[in-house]
Amino acid sequence: MQVLKEEYSNSFWQRVTAESENRVNVEKPLPTIPEQTMKQIREFYGGTITLNDASHENSDVKIQHFTDLLRTFLLPQSLWPSSTQLPQRGNKKVKLLYSATQLQQAGVKFKVSSNKCLVGLKFENGVLEIPCLEFYDTTEALIRNIMALEQTRYIKNGYVTDYFFMLDFLVNTTKDMDLLCDNGIVDNYLGDNNEATLIVNNLHKNILWVGLGTEYCKLCESLNAFYKDRWHIWKAILKQDYFSTPCTTASTMAVAILLALTIIQTVCSIRQVL
């Protein structure tokens, strides 16, 4: 009898433990179907283009179709279709007049932005921050579809189109693309920077350009003004030619000291003669 009591007691506690674990699993919220769908979309298209981490739980967002959904993933939440904070767009057609290599020669530093939103470019204190853009075999087709969508449905709010116009302004040659890749701004999985350059330069073909958004206009004006300031160019040349490495810096300092000593000696000699 004592053995039966012990077996029943052990069985009872095992059932209690199992029921407690099941209750915890039931109470733990399971992912909803939309959440699972969004996760799968991010995993699949994350290998096509960089998608931001904006929340998808905004019930006010009205998505028309799949391409519209992917476009939404590329924009910050403040630019979603339901947002009341859409930036104003002017009628000015301001262009960036200088390529990435030209801007670098003028002293502009390029830095990959921590911002995951593709369109979030920022220029401050001589540093142009650009979010990372990944190029895969399927990236061009996706971008063209989104730009075509903006041409029909978002003609006045073509933020993705604006971004690729800006990128086209920056990239004129393969050297410009090399510069962006070297700074981590472009991750090119195509294997050839020349191919990525051709894609960027051809994306705007057959696209109606109605001008850039206000923020990009300000960005272009700031970069154009920075380049036209001769002091920035002289400072960049001085740094690149005479202070680019420790050896050239040491040589420049030695020459400067020698020149200063020569001038002092000359002045002293003249004073002695007088």
Image (cartoon, helix red, strand yellow):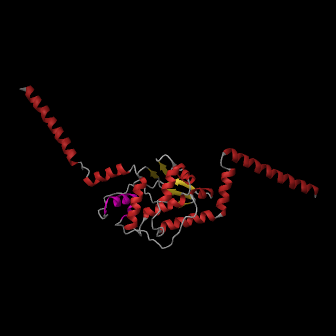
Q: Is residue 100 left or right of residue 163?
A: right
Is residue 181 rendered to the left or right of residue 255? left
Q: Is residue 22 above or below residue 5?
A: below
Question: Would you say the magenta stretch is mainly helix, strand or loop?
Answer: helix
Q: Please indicate whether residue 83 sits to the left or right of residue 135 in the image.
A: left
Query: Is residue 71 within the magenta segment?
Result: yes
The x, y position of residue 118, in whole percent, is 44, 57
Query: Which percent across, then down, holds residue 272?
Result: 92, 55
Point 90% across, 56% down: residue: 270
The extreme front residue here reads: 206
Give the percent coordinates (x, y) of residue 146: 39, 60
Q: Residue at x 83, y 51 (%)?
A: 262
Task: Please tell me which residue is depicted at 27% across the width and 55% down the height of the picture.
Answer: 34
Q: Which residues are magenta?
A: 63-80
Tell me the quarter of the image containing the N terminus: top left
Quick check: can you spot residue 224?
yes
Residue most toward the bottom?
91
Q: Nearer the viewer, residue 221 or 199?
A: 199
Residue 60 within the segment the image draws in magenta = no
> Does the image show residue 122?
no
In which quadrant of the rendered image does the C terminus lie?
A: bottom right
Please state which of residues 213 and 65 is positioned toward the viewer in this rendering.
65
